[in-house]
Image (cartoon, rainbow, N blue to C red):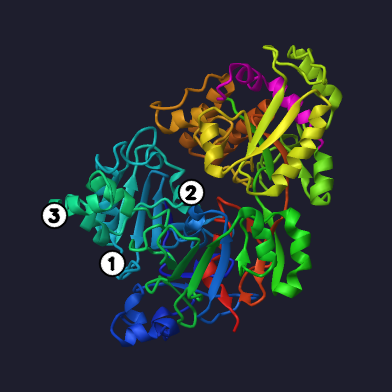
Amino acid sequence: MKTFALAAILLTAAFSAAPTSVAWAQMTLKETTSLAAEVTAGKLPPVEKRLPENPMVVQFTAPYKLGQQGGEMRTLIGRARELRLLNTISYNRLVVYNDKYDFVPDLCERFEVQDERVFTFHLRKGHKWSDGSPFTAEDFRYYWEDVANNAEISPSGPPVDLLVDGERPVVEFPDAYTVRYSWKQRNPKFLPRIAGTSAFYLYRPSTYLKKFHAKYADPAALAKAAAAEKRANWAALHNKIDNMVENDNPDLPTLDAWMIQTRPPSIRFVAVRNPYYHRVDSNGVQLPYLDRVVLAQADPKLIPAKAGAGEADVQFRTIAFSNFTFLKENEKRAGYRTLLWKTAKGSHFTLFPNFNVNDPAWRKLVRDVRFRRALSHGIDREAVNQSLFYGLAQEANNTVLPDSPLFRPMYQTRDTEFDIAKANKLLDELGLTKRGSDGIRLLPDGRPMEIIIETAGEVSEQIDILELIAESWLKVGIKMFPKPSQRDVLRNRIFAGEALMSVWSGLENGVPNAAASPSELAPTSQFQLQWPKWGQFYETKGQNGEAPDMAEAKELLKLNEDWNEAGDLTTREQVWHRMLTIHMEQMYTIGVITGVFQPIVVNRKLANVPDEGIYNWDPGALIGMYRPENFWMKQ
């Protein structure tokens, strides 16, 4: 049995964990300055009554320093839905990744894992939600019994992340501070999902939400409340109010460092410190240091300029490496630093042919690997690298990076050389020999080979890369048109099979080891843009989408299950390599460039932001793994 039994946790600012040497009982707590008036007025209990009996103690090591409370941190968002970033930068989960990508306790005090089948979490006694209500096993029971397994609130049952080959977990609550999940089969994806960037909440603020649940509230009052909110019934009202990910209900209690105060719609969202946050520094100062986080909405095209004008204290979204020179030039005038963090995606820029596109002629072509290889050989990756990234990036497929123990050079280089002759030969082999008067090849039905590549339109760099690709594809008789649109519109068109090809970044985790789930390599999610309907079929257990009808895709699904069932890392490593080999041979996605640095704009007064870091969605939570609650503003 693996046991992570840490009576208290000592965390560095880079977020590594070890048993604490700080004697919590000997610490003198300091009341938060901005909350002192409310404490004096009796509106809030004193800090020692707001913290758990055993809070998480953060110890800073050089170059990070103990901070001072107060001030705010501003960041810019491109759309209102990015308010969800609060759940990302306030990276609080039952279990989280540290900077070594190991699992360590966070909201729970400790946890135990038995044979990847039984997971037991021990909560912190006295831990409270942001409204002061207790955070206990009752919040897990409420979610499991009254939300996930309530047919009116959750018609399709518990989320697929809690199922193992269709099997629901046995969920037990031995006492008020212990929760246990168990399956008959191994569930190696459970901890990664809990620690993941996309928040997976196994609990709900039950004290608050019971007021909106038919099992606990007056039916007449509920019906009246639902009508007032223009909801069909109490369950629809409950689902609207219970939206922890979206952060669109300021009344919903949270366990995060900051709690949202602004109710949508708005273009400026303010979040204030959670007075019951469970972390303190080694001087007895309750975190977060910053009183407020402000997220201001702006046109994505203007965000680099606004960041360069000093309108953000930390900016990481919607700026790209192509903005680096401009940002550096304005540092002194606007009072910020421009950091360059490594990225960990399998590819910075990737083309996603849609295997589920509706157009039958294009669908047949997209599914032929010779076509995908021809497109790859028709890309001058060196020109992209030199023109836009000063030659500092890598020209590579969408696969694992050299920092991964699973890396093999051939995964990155197969079919990536710029070879017009080879691209033309492959296209000729496909029977695409007829051309129009303009030299553009013709499809079998006589239409010109004009590929529309759709983008989210959030980063101008994507259009710059596509223009370079369009130039080289003309040499093989293919005309390409970029089509920017909004992210939600783009995804819906891909899901519906209306988009032929799209652009996104590559593998989310480019530095996995054998213990990491390879599900990203199999058609397991609708959000995999190369086969969304296959992914939807998997997610809905065949109720929606399309069943995979290509042999290699079926094999990937089988290999993914083999990895789940394997009890040793040697077998899991073999599964990984087979899946990576299939992707190398089949080129389901076309990676162009990788190893691109991410600019991070940081106000010079904002302390404890690491000069070097890894910028990644999952694992990493963008900047969340570096604990923004530890950032502080120098006066």
- The reply to whether discs 2 and 1 touch (Cβ–Cβ < 8 Å) is no
What residue is shown with label 2? 192
What residue is shown with label 3? 218
What residue is shown with label 1? 134
Above or below, comparing residue 56 to residue 430 in the picture: below
- The reply to whether discs 1 and 3 touch (Cβ–Cβ < 8 Å) is no
Q: Earlier in the sequence, mark 1 or mark 3?
A: 1
Q: Secondary structure at mark 1?
A: loop
Front residue (pair 313, 296): 296
The numbered dot on residue 26 is none
Q: Position of residue 96 (x, y in %)?
A: 48, 58
Seen at 60% across and 36% down, the residue is 576
Above or below, comparing residue 533 to residue 19 in the picture: above
Q: Quadrant of residue 440?
A: top right
The amino acid at mark 2 is: Pro
The amino acid at mark 1 is: Pro
Seen at 42% across and 44% down, the residue is 116
Above or below, comparing residue 377 to residue 72 in the picture: above
Residue 8 in the figure: left or right of residue 529: left
Q: Position of residue 542 (x, y in %)?
A: 40, 26
The amino acid at mark 3 is: Asp
Seen at 66% across and 43% down, the residue is 346
Main secondary-structure element of the magenta-colored stretch: helix
Q: Which residues are magenta?
A: 356-380
Q: Nearer the viewer, mark 2 or mark 3?
A: 3
Q: Quadrant of residue 342?
A: bottom right
Front residue (pair 6, 503): 503
Q: CA distance from mark 2 to mark 1?
A: 26 Å
Q: Position of residue 218 (x, y in %)?
A: 13, 54
Q: Secondary structure at mark 2?
A: helix
